[in-house]
Image (spheres, coloured by chain):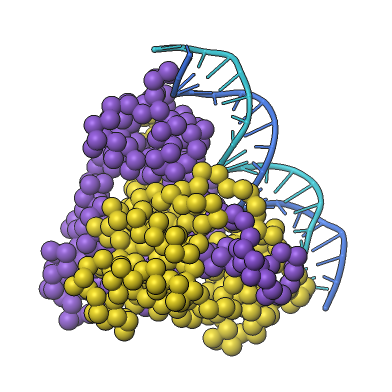
Chain colours: A purple, B yellow, C cyan, D blue
Amino acid sequence: MATGRTHRPATRSRGIPEATVARLPLYLRALTALSERSVPTVSSEELAAAAGVNSAKLRKDFSYLGSYGTRGVGYDVEYLVYQISRELGLTQDWPVVIVGIGNLGAALANYGGFASRGFRVAALIDADPAMAGKPVAGIAVQHTDELEQIIADNGVSIGVIATPAGAAQQVCDRLVAAGVTSILNFAPTVLTVPDGVDVRKVDLSIELQILAFHEQRKAGEDAAHDGGRTAPAVRAATVAADRKGPDGDVPAVMPA
Amino acid sequence: MATGRTHRPATRSRGIPEATVARLPLYLRALTALSERSVPTVSSEELAAAAGVNSAKLRKDFSYLGSYGTRGVGYDVEYLVYQISRELGLTQDWPVVIVGIGNLGAALANYGGFASRGFRVAALIDADPAMAGKPVAGIAVQHTDELEQIIADNGVSIGVIATPAGAAQQVCDRLVAAGVTSILNFAPTVLTVPDGVDVRKVDLSIELQILAFHEQRKAGEDAAHDGGRTAPAVRAATVAADRKGPDGDVPAVMPA
DNA sequence: GCTTGTGAAGACATTCACAGCG
DNA sequence: CGCTGTGAATGTCTTCACAAGC
């Protein structure tokens, strides 16, 4: 979910629903895999299975992009890859900075899925002077002092915050002041940002707590509507809902 | 979002909407902070601001849990902390295993937010024999061969997958066969699981792509409905939607 | 009087089911 | 004949607005 802003302008960017946007990357990943296997076309049924959604939803999603399929046949894989990439803005280069090079920041820096999607790690930034100059994932870490200069020099508009919670808002403010307009926040804090700045949050502890909720329901608790920590009997299917992409709210990971 | 299962039974566990469940951890975090500052009560307005949602939503959410507030006054912080913790199942101990101790797995192992929420890292598991015995976050890494034994010995029901994509489904199958019924997946793959098993996924690359989509809309593109990569003019507010908690689909991070 | 709790309204999302078309 | 694309139906979530209650 978008944090910091209380309500959104509902200005669903040129017609594509948020829930659909959140699924496009999934489709893209499945399509890329098909493309690598040189599969020329795919039906909504097959692609939906590969992406883990149902076919009606997938067709509806694609209908927002335009009519890119052929009735009786399916979708052209290469063409769809291109169209979705373009729609997501992945045909252009997105320089990204990662702030907070702890365990998580290093993991992100080493993440291979960046380059293939148009994202380029322009810089790694950390507040610890001892980190400065150290290479992580082949990139020398730079000190926080240089943050503004780095943003300006590289035309960075997307920032990733992987700092401890206490430093996140401060880092966020500096990123925004320097011109960043999209932030991916891994710190377990609600960030406050001005209008026009987009924040997405990933929070491991939240995901685990949601799992625990469902897990708890599986064992015991039927009739008992109160704190009765009763039975051990396994109950049937409780399946977690989608992330609602948007707020889908949803997930988290962060350093200590 | 829950992957692997195509549709959910809509068995909204005893009445609490998924979207609400996904927000409970947020409220809990905000409440914990208030508790530490010894704040005795809080109004829906204040708490909502701290959690980054609007107050009507928060009150509706709490109404699903019961009537824990006092009109004209607000909510008792300590009491709410307890009620939400209980509802999420955090008053019990949840042993968790993390499989795949690369950069990300190590980051997760070092994550401090576990213990305070009832989660306990029971074991770290990796397929690399060279890792076996090495201490990460004070816990000796064990080899994949011991996975089943570890699950059984510790009564683990929640597993975290932080392996490369190629190994994820296999690890998932073994976890499930050994008795794990909730999985948090950081690998960029759609996992297939039997009914009754809950999967949540966190995917960094997806989050970045969603940000890129909105970022692209901010700069240029008004009338042009096709590939016209036209203007540079900055457009007004595009705010990301919530994560939709449930599927809230939502987000991602993983190792190479 | 101030704030909760909640019906009712509205927005959004998913699913159905079939017409349309290659 | 098969599969896409989409209106209509259904379901879920959010927001409004106010009655109820301390």
- Quarter occupied by residue A23: top left
| Residue A26 vs residue A165, the one in the foreground | A26
Residue shown at the point (62%, 56%) measured from the top left? A236
The spot of residue B184 in percent (x, y) is: 43, 61
| Residue A23 vs residue B200, the one in the foreground | B200
Residue shown at the point (51%, 57%) measured from the top left? B198
Residue A241 is left or right of residue A85, and the answer is right
Q: Is residue A45 above or below residue A110?
A: above
Q: Is residue A189 above or below residue A2?
A: below
The quarter of the rendered structure image containing the C terminus of chain A is bottom left
| Residue A123 vs residue A234, the one in the foreground | A234
The spot of residue C18 in percent (x, y) is: 61, 18
Residue shown at the point (52%, 33%) measured from the top left? A56
Residue A246 is left or right of residue A186, and the answer is right
Query: Exactly how many numbered labels are in the figure?
Result: 0
The spot of residue B130 in percent (x, y) is: 18, 72
Q: Is residue B112 visible?
A: yes
Q: Is residue B239 visible?
A: no
Q: Is residue A68 above or below residue B94?
A: above
- Quarter occupied by residue A37: top left
The spot of residue B32 in percent (x, y) is: 55, 79
Residue shown at the point (24%, 42%) measured from the top left? A92
